[in-house]
Amino acid sequence: MQCDEWALYRRKEHYPRGHKEFRGPFFNVHGPMDTMSWFSNHGVELKTGKVVASASISTGGKFALKIQKLINCFEHVEANYLLIASGSSRQGFSLAAQLGHSLIDPVPSLFTFKIEDPQLAELSGVSFPKVRAKLKLENIQRHLPQYTQVGPMLVTHWGLSGPVILRLSAWGARDLFASDYKGLLIVDFTPDLHLEDVKRILTRHKSQFMKQKVHSSCPSEFGLVKRFWKYLLDREEINDEILWASISNKSLASISYLLKQCIFKILGKGQFKDEFVTAGGVPLSEVSLKTMESKIHSRLFFAGEVLNVDGVTGGFNFQNAWSGGYIAGTSIGGLANVKHIGMMNHLDIWLSTFAYIHQLSNQYHTTYQRMLLHWLL
Ligand SMILES: Cc1cc2nc3c(=O)[nH]c(=O)nc-3n(C[C@H](O)[C@H](O)[C@H](O)COP(=O)(O)OP(=O)(O)OC[C@H]3O[C@@H](n4cnc5c(N)ncnc54)[C@H](O)[C@@H]3O)c2cc1C
């Protein structure tokens, strides 16, 4: 590899941490080109910067792929086997459709909620280790048990995020889409306490801290940060200067209700493309999960997010892609009766995403290639 190419991979913008250390011999031992050579030497031909623009069945029954190299520059490839593992790319969905598959409309999943509340935005960065949050959507009657989630939540400068919100967005992805991402989020900030316990704690605090201002003294049992306690009191229009001694029982009751059932108006989802995963794609009913082969066209395979599978956060989407990729690769290997890696070059197996490395640092591609090699070896 040329020195200037090495410099490219070490560049600051690629490694916010580590770029100084990488000026040493680190990449000389096994650099990006070595990684690519390793795959090529093991019989996996890598292709970069190319996109499968269309797919059809040739007169000989092979897959005819039109591949775009540059703008207006195409090549044509025929393949005995085709694995579509194109993630949530629109083009991938279109390839599946061109080969006779139906599609469940793709909609975003795993996203944050935009909340209408300027005071909440001021709390950006505040997190809650455990809340119970319930989703109520406009025009949606049904209520799944999964529309209530318990776990950590985070305030962002545009609304709410964190595992609880992402899980709600995943389970409610279709209903949220149908209701134009409008609805209510009802949050219980003390999920381990009953309403009566919350009231009792407030009453006891009142009797113990009579001379302190309500705004500056929050019962420790609630585990709330001061800024959020002040936010709750402001929502209840409790005067900044009022002492615990002067607070009415009615106010204590309303603070208790707010802690247990704090309503936030959902105005939309986080910015477009902020979502992590897409719900929808090729229906699982059209694919054999034993082999990942299409039930509509033999020798056509699918794996990963192109299928109508999506999981919550925690690596479940990766695992779907890895498991499906492994099964598909193994199935193709079995069908092609590959015995030796060397034979791989003679086989006309064209694996769309196996063959594409758009970014050398993209771990997802290499994962597929590892799975393919596992099958070959
Ligand atoms: C920011 C972010 C964070 C995420 N975090 C997590 C996480 O923590 N845990 C988790 O489980 N999941 C996570 N996901 C989701 C996860 O990345 C995907 O579900 C998973 O990578 C899907 O794998 P895949 O192989 O199906 O598709 P991808 O990894 O998307 O790979 C598809 C590849 O196909 C290529 N391709 C598409 N169309 C064509 C075409 N026409 N021709 C040639 N090539 C094509 C694409 O360029 C891409 O390289 C995250 C996603 C995002 C965006």
Image (spheres, grey):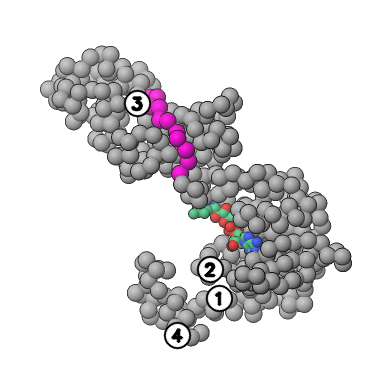
Query: Which residue is the site of mark 1?
Result: 35
Between circles 1 and 2, the one closer to the viewer is 2
Residue 259 is labelled as 3
Amino acid carrying mark 1 in the image: Thr
Q: Is residue 323 above or below residue 21?
A: above
Q: Which percent across, then down, holds residue 227?
A: 25, 36
Residue 3 is labelled as 4
Question: Residue visible at 35% across and 34% down?
Answer: 117
Question: Residue visible at 72% across and 62% down?
Answer: 54
Between circles 3 and 2, the one closer to the viewer is 2
Marks 4 and 1 in Cβ contact (< 8 Å): no
Residue 359 is labelled as 2
| Number of numbered discs visible in the structure rendering | 4
Secondary structure at badge 1 equals helix
Marks 1 and 3 in Cβ contact (< 8 Å): no
Find the magenta span and give its range.
260-270
Q: Which percent across, then down, holds residue 212?
A: 14, 25
Q: CA distance from mark 3 to mark 2?
A: 47 Å
Q: Is residue 304 visible from the viewing direction of this image?
A: no
In depth, the one of 328 and 239 nearer the eye is 239
Q: CA distance from mark 4 to mark 2?
A: 19 Å
Within 8 Å of ligand 1, the CB of disc 2?
A: yes
Between circles 4 and 3, the one closer to the viewer is 4
Marks 4 and 2 in Cβ contact (< 8 Å): no
Secondary structure at badge 3 equals helix
Q: Is residue 159 above or below residue 290?
A: above
